Image (cartoon, helix red, strand yellow):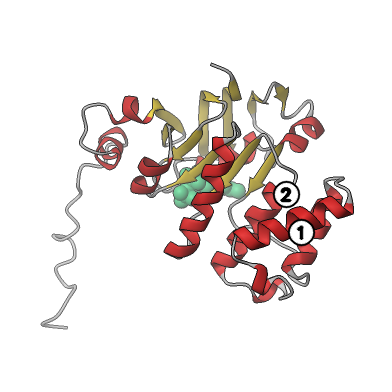
Amino acid sequence: MTSAVSVRGLWKRFGQQIAVAGIDLELPAGKFIGLVGPNGAGKTTTLSMVTGLLRPDQGTVEVVGHDVWRDPVAVKARIGVLPEGLRLFERLSGRELLAYTGRLRGLPGAEVDKRATQLLDVLDLAGAQHKLVVDYSTGMRKKIGLACALLHNPEVLFLDEPFEGVDPVSAQTIRGVLERYTGSGATVVFSSHVMELVESLCDWVAVMAAGRIRAHGTLAEVRGEASSLQQAFLELVGAHGRDAGSDLDWLGGGSR
Ligand SMILES: Nc1ncnc2c1ncn2[C@@H]1O[C@H](COP(=O)(O)OP(=O)(O)OP(=O)(O)O)[C@@H](O)[C@H]1O
């Protein structure tokens, strides 16, 4: 198995809080990989360290054979990132943002124009290409962020919650683009809480909880005997159906 990403002994603490507790992970190349876990599991912290946005306290990360912290330029040339809480240049139009991103990536102007036109078209943003990004909806922002992340045809694409706040039509569009991309041998790593989505998209899954990897492998390996990934996930993260009803006896109709 060729690894797209190799993580060894990765740690991150924020004061007393251990966000990532010494994880090891080999993510196979050419797969659609889901990183799943409950709120606060450490997914964003892990993805930030893997993509060179946050320096680990300890441990190493290699992406397509290059050390992220010793050889950041080589890694950044080979990856695309759609981070959580994506910050964009709000006073540029979608088309200008792509042109700017393409030039930063060192692509020739004509090639940037060609790729930008195709991406805007496929992502259903052609009609909004001259609108300022500040006026884009949440889903449109995700899509233009994805277009920027794909423009230089990276080998590995990292997406933090790419479907959050995205309507079903846009989600289907994003999905189609990502499936085409992995179909040609590239790797997608994305984080999500939505198990049905991960189950329907991913070939390979890593489950994270409280800063540790609880399970990883093919979808079938992680699902095991459970009826669904959701069920396997609930068992792995130890969420045994807390009864929300009994503590909230004041909630609902009737007496105030
Ligand atoms: N900059 C920070 N300062 C202090 N604590 C942080 C910081 N970033 C993350 N944490 C803490 O680290 C833990 C892991 O957070 P992280 O955002 O990585 O989780 P996550 O799995 O992405 O969660 P979610 O699914 O809710 O986005 C949490 O307890 C969080 O409060």
State the residue in front, 249 or 42.
42
Q: CA distance from mark 2 to mark 1?
A: 8 Å
State the residue in front, 77 or 88.
77
State the residue in front, 113 or 141.
113
User: Residue 151: which disc?
Assistant: 2
Q: Residues within 10 Å of mark 2 (few under 14, many from 20)?
A: many
Q: Total marks drawn?
A: 2
> Which quadrant does the C terminus fall into?
bottom left
Task: Verify CB contact (< 8 Å) between mark 2 and mark 1.
Answer: yes
**Toward which corner of the image does residue 208 lie, by quadrant?**
top left
Is 217 displayed left or right of 102 in the figure?
left
Residue at 50% over, 36% down: 32
| Residue 14 in view, yes or no | no
Residue at 25% over, 35% down: 235
**Toward which corner of the image does residue 186 lie, by quadrant?**
top right
Say if disc 1 is inside 8 Å of ligand 1.
no
- Image coordinates for residue 255, horizontal then vertical, percent: 12, 83
Residue at 71% over, 62% down: 88
Question: In the figure, 67 relative to 86: above or below?
Answer: above
Question: In the figure, 137 relative to 101: above or below?
Answer: below
- Image coordinates for residue 197, horizontal then vertical, percent: 39, 48
User: Residue 98: which disc?
Assistant: 1
